[in-house]
Amino acid sequence: MRPTTKVLPEHARGHNRSLVLQTLYRAGQQSRADIARETGLTRVTISDLVAELIVEGLVIETGQREDARPGKPATLLDLNRNAFQIIGIDLSEYAIFRGAVLDLDGQILHRAELPLAGSTGADATALVSALAESLIAQATLPVLGLGVGSPGVVDLAGVVLSAPNLGWEGEELQATLAERFGIPVVVANDANAAALAEHSFGSADSDMMLIKVGHGVGAGLLLGGTPLFGSRFAAGEIGHVVVGTDGGAECACGKRGCLETWLATPRLERAIAASPDRELQILTEAGQRLGIALAPVVGALNLAEVVLSGPTRLLDGPLAQATIETLRNRTMAEFHGDLTLRMTTLGEDIVMRGAAVMVLSAQLGVS
Amino acid sequence: MRPTTKVLPEHARGHNRSLVLQTLYRAGQQSRADIARETGLTRVTISDLVAELIVEGLVIETGQREDARPGKPATLLDLNRNAFQIIGIDLSEYAIFRGAVLDLDGQILHRAELPLAGSTGADATALVSALAESLIAQATLPVLGLGVGSPGVVDLAGVVLSAPNLGWEGEELQATLAERFGIPVVVANDANAAALAEHSFGSADSDMMLIKVGHGVGAGLLLGGTPLFGSRFAAGEIGHVVVGTDGGAECACGKRGCLETWLATPRLERAIAASPDRELQILTEAGQRLGIALAPVVGALNLAEVVLSGPTRLLDGPLAQATIETLRNRTMAEFHGDLTLRMTTLGEDIVMRGAAVMVLSAQLGVS
DNA sequence: CATGTTTGTTAGTAAACCTTACGAACAAAC
DNA sequence: GTTTGTTCGTAAGGTTTACTAACAAACATG
């Protein structure tokens, strides 16, 4: 609560503007008087803000309320959900870039994919650009913005500081794409995007942690509804945290017993393929390791919700079961009696939809 | 960035008011023009705000600037540091309640103590009240407010939801004290208070974790300069997180290998007393355990700074050394190359001074 | 049909910050 | 000693923002 920047009345205005959009985005089909009651602002002020938003084309009147009530019938408003579409791109899969055109509600209207074929560095950047171009061409409405969920460490300006798999280091992806297409672009970490999606479109709380298991292991943290970035923008990079005190397999990073050595999907699949009859045991142990690693985090942050994202076949079963049991055994039940752990409800589209949330949040202050 | 409440111009005013106080609090002896330059507001607005603050007695003119510069000499301003004093109380020690009268800069002017003598429940509350009363009587200026750092889980209204050692459960300490003394009261968790103190009076970053080792083990987390509370206000309660995968001593909570069984001072002292020649080994192992527990937290939050508070004799040496080494060995150096771990510079007064920070922050928006 | 309710707008006011302009007080240069 | 330019603080006036008060329109209800 430490003030660091001046606040002018016009900033307050912008805040209240977003508040109106937010109210309409979530509930939709409300009258000016409804919004006034919900926000605490007066009808006059709401009328003023709404008039502005209607001129900008962001809000439309959708007719009169039908139900029989005394008084003048209300004029219903809604976000102009057919005014814009959003492009969301997911760079987190190992061998393929995936993207989609989405509507303002986060529904996927059109998909596209581009195989990576081992591209790195500038080639990978060109691929992202090509994918974005084809998606923008597929949009049937003006594009509100382009969101990208990238693996690795991404700073607040959308510079990918480090993404080893893609050969990126200090790659100015957001600036490059914004210049190329002339539309608003947001680039952020894939797990952070996923956490935002789960919060907006799933049922997630505003304090939660999303664990993304794939070729690597990463996490996205939401505290008070806001993503956490960390001192070097590397918050959530838990794949190379060592788990337990009993050694473990050697990791590409040089250490032993990193979380990834127990949990990354290639390792799990290889282990199961090598001894199919030990599948239950392998998955259970992986879940336990995840629980061991998460327990201090859940305890320190007093998290009430952990969400898993990744291959359902591997995660949703003994692994998740072992994780929650381990978590419960290793933290204070008194503080975490309501701790829940579950799979995401958004499946494989989670990062693309999270990318859309980032655009909504940046452009409209809505999410 | 999700807007949830309306913002009126008067709120902006309050923010800017605090901004002026904050500027004066930190730098002091500045002119109106200096503040205008630093905050980005105009000289006119600053003059207006300052006039208001002078009327309220919070700011005073301290004379003219002496140095030879062209132009009209500046009228220097400062917080009226002799207008108020603050009462800070620390309930975190095992057998004694400690308190102090502090000035606005957080310097301790007068101390008082009250032995607990096994008091719990309402008796303990009465002791706090008595200590506060004696301190208020010692204050030589009007009291800006009373801050209390309590062990256990404390909610945002200053209700101690749970503090086993003091026999408190749902104890409405803040309300009780506010009613009794008729002054602003802030009650919060002791480790959170300590973290605030280290941030304001020590050299701590705005993203840091403070580990408080004493009869128990707790932590205070500062993210972006703001304390983290957690879903049930139990953030930082890491004393009963299980460490490692190799058992450990039995804990009062029923589990095995809780962080407290490795680190709490009574256990450490007993272990060292039992085999003095193994002191180095005991301290090193305790440090390693702390490092093991913290590694996932430091990794997930990408913390750059961890501060230890507690008995210097035990912590500041092999224990701290083992902790930082373990942390480095268990996290990615790439992300945490600049990770530092150090003792607090505020010694045993840290909680009382943190309590003062809470009052400053609540009453003036300053810290 | 009269009455009361609800909606959305108009008109006027108060608060907060801005721009512009100015006098006071000084240093430095001539 | 005078001129010039700088800096400080204040005064006056304008713009933005959201408020209160009042009202017409449109409806349900007794």
Image (tube, coloured by chain):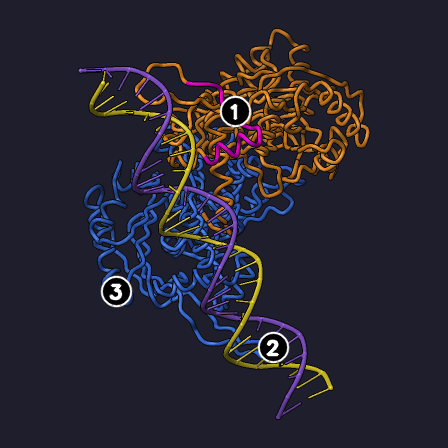
Chain colours: A orange, B blue, C yellow, D purple
Quarter residue A282 falls in: top right
The residue where tag 3 is placed is B138
- Alpha-carbon distance for marks 1 and 2? 59 Å
Quarter residue A32 falls in: top left
Q: Position of residue B112 (x, y in %)?
A: 28, 60
Please give the label number shown on residue A69: none
* Amino acid tagged 2: Pro
Quarter residue A174 falls in: top right
Residue closest to the eye, A294 or A250: A294
Q: Position of residue A259 (x, y in %)?
A: 60, 27
Q: Give the letter of the chain under mark 3.
A: B
Q: Do marks 3 and 1 both belong to one polypeptide chain?
A: no
Residue closest to the eye, A85 or A77: A77
Vertical placement of A40 versus B97: above or below? above
Q: Residue at x 32, y 58 (%)?
A: B144
Q: Give the letter of the chain under mark 2.
A: B
Q: Decide if residue B233 is in sight here.
A: no
Q: Residue at x 44, y 44 (%)?
A: B227
The residue where tag 1 is placed is A60
- Given this view, does label 3 or label 2 mark the residue nearer the observer? 2
Start-end of magenta stretch: A48-64
Q: Would residue B323 appear left or right of B154 to someone viewing this image? A: right
